[in-house]
Image (spheres, rainbow, N blue to C red):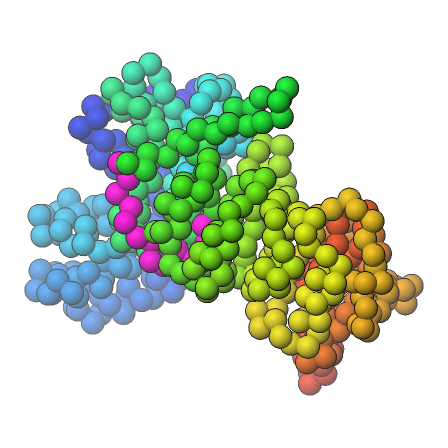
Amino acid sequence: ENTSTNTEQSWALGGFNSALEEIEHDNMRTPKEEVVKTEMEKLLDFIGGFEKWSLLNEDCRQEIVKYLDYKTRYHLGVCSKADYQTVERTPIHVHSIEIRDNNVIDLMYFMDDFVGDHVNVVVRFDDDPNSRECLDLIFSQEGEDTRILWLKYLPKKKPEKRQVFVKLCNYYEVAVKFAEKWMRKCNYELSALTVVMVTRIYKCQFKQNTFQSNYPFETSTIKHLPKCRSISIDAKDMDGIDWWLQKMPEKLDGLFLPYFSDLPSEFWERPQVMVVLPSNLQYQLFQVTKVSGSVCIPTNLTDEQFLGLKAKYIGIESENITEPGINQFLKQYVTGRRENGVKEVIFWSDREWKKNEIIDGLKVQPWNSDFEIEEDAFCDDFRRICGGGEMYQIKSLKDPFESITLQISYDRVGIFGTGKRVTNDGVTSSEFSIPV
């Protein structure tokens, strides 16, 4: 399928905003949520229709604009200078922004057009990763110009490929400028951010990697991301990570960092890590071979440091973590001392685990035939998704209807929050599922 010719436009660098307005207007669709429609109808009734729009003060106008989708904002903004200023002053809700180098998966629809270096930028307006209510663009270099590709979704038709060109500029500059423009549009109040902009150069014969950071820190307009609750960073060194963490609030729900063979001790003193700990601390392997989402912390983390973490999701590869340390972690859960609870904790190692030291002093229930028959769907799903090994349920002393699954296999020890209290028709019981 050829790229649609009606959007093959070229813009000078000075016309950058015009090019992006073309893209954004083409991508955005009117929200279908009835609640928004109802709220807008109430507002129209209250103000007596839009014929009285000009009589409203600026605060009221901005409050109404908050409910408008991007297309409506766009059309309102070209009505008058006052309307344009109202639209510009009113932040639009953006849930997350993703900026990724050479994201092969997102090139699926564009393989006929090119295969080369590019940056993929995704601006999401809700927390549904499958929603099409987003801007999903690919930026690449075409000679001295930047080519921007995207898909336009039409009802009951295949997506149409669209493109524009921005003349005489670098595709990295345009991609980052686009992403940061949308950060400004939401007043830097996005909830989640993903930045994967590192070039890895492998030296296999020496088993070493070198890294080149590609994010233009020196020209960035980002000062603070006050409401960002989850951030995924790929950086070449701790300086890059520090730059991003300085922009983050002290309390995070998710912190995803790149593969490092070791971490400096001062890292564990970062506010986002130790002072007000995140509920989700993971180290993501961003290599293409690991797109399945495997997580790992290859670090010199000790038992004491590990037990101080309040994260719900942790993946650790450290020879310093001992069986007694894992035992203490399990006892923290059983006695209710882990206030944040447990979702998924995995200790990666191919050493021979000393099971007796891990379960010492704990009342554990092996997965026997009765349990596997009664909870067959859960047990099948668990082994399919989490792998095999010896499985045990460990109940909470604080709430016997709550429990965790302890998994001991040849390459890991896993702890999963699987048993939850449920009440149906006045009857309380345990319901088992894999944590998400």
List the single residue furthest toward the top.
143
In-image side of 103 versus 414 (left or right): left
Counting from the top left corner in percent of width and height, residue 417 is at 68, 64
List the single residue furthest toward the right.
369
Using the image, determine if residue 27 lies above or below residue 430. above
Residue nearest the viewer, comparing 428 with 102: 102
Residue nearest the viewer, comparing 338 with 117: 338
List the single residue furthest toward the bottom.
426
Confirm whether the magenta stretch covers residue 220.
yes
List the single residue furthest toward the front.
265
In-image side of 62 versus 200 (left or right): left
How many labels sit on residues? 0
Counting from the top left corner in percent of width and height, residue 301 is at 61, 52
- Residue at horizontal 12 percent and vertical 62 percent from the top: 58
Counting from the top left corner in percent of width and height, residue 123 is at 39, 44
- Residue at horizontal 45 percent and vertical 42 percent from the top: 238
Q: Would residue 37 be seen by someone viewing this image from the given angle?
A: yes
Confirm whether the magenta stretch covers residue 299.
no
- Residue at horizontal 42 percent and vertical 26 percent from the top: 118
Q: Would residue 52 be seen by someone viewing this image from the given angle?
A: no
Give the dominant element type of the magenta stretch: helix, strand or loop. loop
Using the image, determine if residue 174 lies above or below residue 379. above
Using the image, determine if residue 431 lies above or below residue 24. below
Using the image, determine if residue 423 lies above or below residue 165. below
Counting from the top left corner in percent of width and height, residue 434 is at 69, 59
Could you say which quadrant of the image residue 168 lies in? top left
Per the rendered image, the range of residues in magenta is 219-231
